[in-house]
Amino acid sequence: MFSLESLFCCLELLIFSIIAGLLGSLTGLGGGTVLVPILTLFLGIPIAYAAGASLISTIATSSGAASAYIRDKITNVRIGMGLNMGTTTGSILGSLTAAYIYSHNLAWVIYVIFGIVILLSIIPTVQRGKYEIPDPRPPDWTTRVFKLYGSYYDKALKSEVRYWGVRWWLGLLIMFFAGFISGLLGIGAGALKVLGMDWAMNLPMKVSTTTSNFIIGVTAATGSSLYWYFGYIQPLMASITAVGVLIGAMSGTRILVRITNKQVRWIFLAILAYLGMASLLRGLYYGHVISIPIITQYLLSVLFMGVLMSTLYYIYGIKMRTVNNTVRGGRNG
């Protein structure tokens, strides 16, 4: 019989899952990238089971968000299908590697890798932060052969956005690595998938995030089958998180079409900064490399996010705006 405490835990799990799904669908990260650290950092759930629940939830996120984005014609299904080859192959290898790590009590390594991967993702994302729509590049042979182009109507900009994808081979390589990380960490690895399309293939941010939402479901389905085989999926936990993430993801799709690419990128960066630092500190703590109390780790992660976002806002918000105004003033003069 369910006790009041169990009911409260389920409710808590559902609320956190809704938040994870909302943020995951907005940024293309997938619910798992947000859900795994939330379950482990805030609820104390072992990372192996959090990763298993996350993979199931990621399928739910992908199903809910991707269907809406395809309906709005923002997702590029052709590009997504072409990149799925890399993610599924990587996911199988990553899941087998994770099983080895968990069986040898090396879970802290997962936290550290997770933190480093997320923090490194910030660099190329920041470098493209000044663009609302990427500068067009001439189509290469992959564009011509695989027809990697498209268009969508941007409600925030009130205009039709046309784009061309480039360097499919580089995108596929990054997708393989993203699939490996997905299987290893039990997440959608949307951060890497978005980078593969945003940075490597020069696609608009909204196309990258929505196509990432489409891809992560296939990747997660591959990884979750192996996690189920190894016993890392708790059915009740996975069910609750899947429902919560799906609710959050459906809400996120209604918000995304109304905000700009730059606003999506700022949200993306803030989440990466906090989760990356929090996971890195937790991994080093579990590995007995540092002895910082848990509450201090939260505060340090928030501080890092605040300092980073303030610095970026100064550089790309205030400073760049001042430079642009000066240039315009000079031209006018």
Image (cartoon, rainbow, N blue to C red):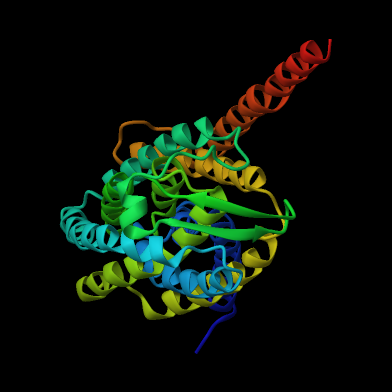
From the viewer's perspective, is 17 left or right of 47? right
User: Foreground residue, 101 or 129?
Assistant: 129
The vertical placement of 263 against 291, above or below, is below
Would residue 209 be found to the left or right of residue 260 on screen?
left
In the picture shown, does residue 231 fall above or below 330? below
Q: Quadrant of the C terminus?
A: top right
Quadrant assignment, res 21: bottom right
Q: Choose between 142 and 110: the one closer to the eye.
A: 142
Q: Residue at coordinates 21% horizontally, 61% vertically from top-left?
A: 89
Percent position of residue 122, x then y: 47, 36
User: Residue 197 location in percent, x, y?
Assistant: 42, 49
Q: Residue at x 27, y 70 (%)?
A: 222
Number of labels in the image equals: 0
Farthest residue to the right: give it.
333
Image quadrant where residue 118 sits = top left
Task: Name the one closer to the observer, 137 or 171.
Answer: 137
Q: Position of residue 152 (x, y in %)?
A: 60, 60
Residue 42 in view, yes or no:
no
- Residue 121's spot in the image, x, y percent? 43, 39
Instruction: Using the image, determine if residue 120 lies above or below residue 215.
Output: above
Q: Does residue 100 appear anywhere in the picture?
A: yes
Front one among 106 and 309: 309
Extreme-bottom residue of the structure: 1
